[in-house]
């Protein structure tokens, strides 16, 4: 089929010329990008489009699930026995700790009620499984198997058994994409547990899980091994959850800020399951709202 | 299979696209993940050359949109880039079809470089720039994959006409 024009589609029913198609679809793409990036106006559209992606995720998942099932069902008896013994031991330890925790929690609640600041006490959690799919190679993001149908929302905090994992970035119908605390675009406000110094732990985006705390002054009292907990100042992560331990502090007297690095406590590269967290935000009106209401009167 | 472009059916295009989408999200170790070729983009170029009536601009655009949804990037980003590559392929398809394979591979390499540059550029505008040199590796692995893709799909198309 040799034609003289560069457009080899049939002359009848050819549709608009190529340039017009390029222009039209190009404009549509740019509009879609602006709407999605600037305002998040396309969350609902993404919700449904990601539902279409589910079969593909399922196909990718199948070999892994098959492998897990096989190793699970053919695991030998002694292995299961030792695992069972270990878990029983862990449960016993956890139970005894919980006994104290209940009492402390009750005391804490009473004290907080006295202060009328019961912040983040009623919590609900849901376990989500990480889907073994690869997203972008340079971002620290994972996909989980819970979505809008389970009540997952954007900006929801995600934990595992050891600490803060990250937050929900994109919500689909039955899947959601998490951004991990080690991503270079993520930051979590933290507090040194020992003395309450506040700072911000930023992800580095490197392959090894690492956080950096760029706003610790040279004089600030932070040591290797200090526990960093979330400070709750961002209204995303509730206060008091362990985030990381400080692994490196370098003070150069000529600089303003010390070089502080920390290692996340959550097992970001080994997790299979994570915990989604719902907290009841306290109904405390913001100072600006109060001022506006006062102005109205 | 009612609509066909010569001997290529719409079903055949869809099957290859689905396979490419699965391979695009298949979990790989990090060093392989970094070099993962853009198989879907190669398919868009291939089908634009060999079945231009089926694989028009809309086809390329939708493939890019699928990548955006699967990879969680800003909607429309890869759609725009796929559209651009698709347009250029359509524009130069009569020339590219008669090129020997080596020259065709070089042309594809140029298209891929342009694609990666536009992705890099839009990444920067959106605000998640990845500036390491390793981001250019997939361009070259994809270009190396082109002769293989052509060989496999050409054989398949010739066998079941």
Image: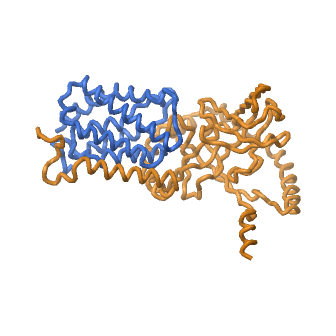
From the viewer's side, name the closer residue of A282 and A142.
Answer: A282
From the image, state the color of chain B: blue
From the viewer's side, name the closer residue of A33 and A134.
Answer: A33
**Residue A85 in view (yes/no):** no
Q: Position of residue A274 (x, y in %)?
A: 63, 45
Left or right position of B102 against A124: left
In the depicted structure, whether residue A290 falls above or below residue A62 = below
From the viewer's side, name the closer residue of B36 and A260.
Answer: A260
Which chain did the image draw in orange?
A
Left or right position of A267 against A60: right
Residue at image coords 53%, 34%: A138
Residue at image coords 16%, 43%: A8
From the viewer's side, name the closer residue of A68 and A113.
Answer: A113
Q: How many marks?
A: 0
Q: Residue furthest bottom?
A: A297
**Residue A282 in view (yes/no):** yes
Say which quarter of the image contains residue B44. Answer: top left
Residue at image coords 47%, 30%: B135
Q: In the rendered image, which quarter contains the C terminus of chain B?
A: top left
Residue at image coords 41%, 40%: B22
Q: Residue furthest top?
A: B102
Q: Position of residue A32 (x, y in %)?
A: 43, 53
Q: Position of residue B155 (x, y in %)?
A: 22, 31
Say which quarter of the image contains residue A59. Answer: top left
Q: How is the image coloured?
A: by chain
Left or right position of B2 against A148: left
Q: Position of residue A136 (x, y in %)?
A: 50, 38
In the depicted structure, whether residue A229 falls above or below residue A259 = below
């Amino acid at each position: 089929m040799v034609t003289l024009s560069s457009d080899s589609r049939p002359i009848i029913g050819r549709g608009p010329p190529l340039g017009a198609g390029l222009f039209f679809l190009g404009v549509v793409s740019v509009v879609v990008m602006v709407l999605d990036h600037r305002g998040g106006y396309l969350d609902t559209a993404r919700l449904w489009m990601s539902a279409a992606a589910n079969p593909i995720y399922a196909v990718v998942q199948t070999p892994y699930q098959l492998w897990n099932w096989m190793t699970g069902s053919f695991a030998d008896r002694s292995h299961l026995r030792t695992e069972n013994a270990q878990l029983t031991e862990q449960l016993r330890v956890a139970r005894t700790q919980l006994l104290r925790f209940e009492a402390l929690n009750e005391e804490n609640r009473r004290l907080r009620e006295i202060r009328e600041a019961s912040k983040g006490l009623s919590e609900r959690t849901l376990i989500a499984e990480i889907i073994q799919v690869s997203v972008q190679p340079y971002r620290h993001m994972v996909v989980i198997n819970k979505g809008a149908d389970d009540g997952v929302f954007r900006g929801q905090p995600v934990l595992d058994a050891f600490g803060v994992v990250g937050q929900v970035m994109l919500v689909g119908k039955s899947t959601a994409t998490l951004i991990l605390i080690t991503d270079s675009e993520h930051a979590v406000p933290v507090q040194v547990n020992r003395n309450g110094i506040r700072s911000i732990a930023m992800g580095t985006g490197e392959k090894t899980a690492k956080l950096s705390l760029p706003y610790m002054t040279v004089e600030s009292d932070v040591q290797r091994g200090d526990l960093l907990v979330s400070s709750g100042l961002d209204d995303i992560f509730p206060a008091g959850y362990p985030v990381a331990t400080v692994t490196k502090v370098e003070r150069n007297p000529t600089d303003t800020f010390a070089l502080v690095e920390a290692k996340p406590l959550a097992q970001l590269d080994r997790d299979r399951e994570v915990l989604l967290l719902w907290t009841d935000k306290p109904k405390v009106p913001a100072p600006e709202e109060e001022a506006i209401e006062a102005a109205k009167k | 299979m009612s609509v066909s472009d010569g001997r290529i059916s719409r079903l055949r295009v869809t099957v290859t696209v689905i396979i490419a989408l699965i391979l695009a999200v298949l979990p790989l170790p990090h060093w392989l993940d970094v070099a993962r070729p853009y198989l879907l983009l190669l398919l868009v170029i291939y089908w634009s050359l060999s079945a231009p009536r089926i694989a028009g601009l809309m086809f390329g655009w939708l493939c890019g949109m699928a990548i955006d949804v699967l990879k969680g990037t800003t909607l429309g980003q890869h759609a725009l880039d796929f559209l651009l590559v698709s347009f250029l392929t359509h524009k130069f398809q009569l020339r590219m079809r008669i090129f020997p394979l080596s020259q065709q591979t070089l042309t594809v390499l140029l298209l891929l470089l342009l694609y990666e540059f536009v992705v890099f550029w839009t990444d920067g505008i959106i605000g998640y720039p990845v500036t390491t040199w390793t981001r250019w590796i997939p361009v070259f692995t994809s270009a190396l994959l082109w002769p293989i893709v052509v060989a496999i799909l050409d054989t398949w198309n010739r066998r079941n006409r």
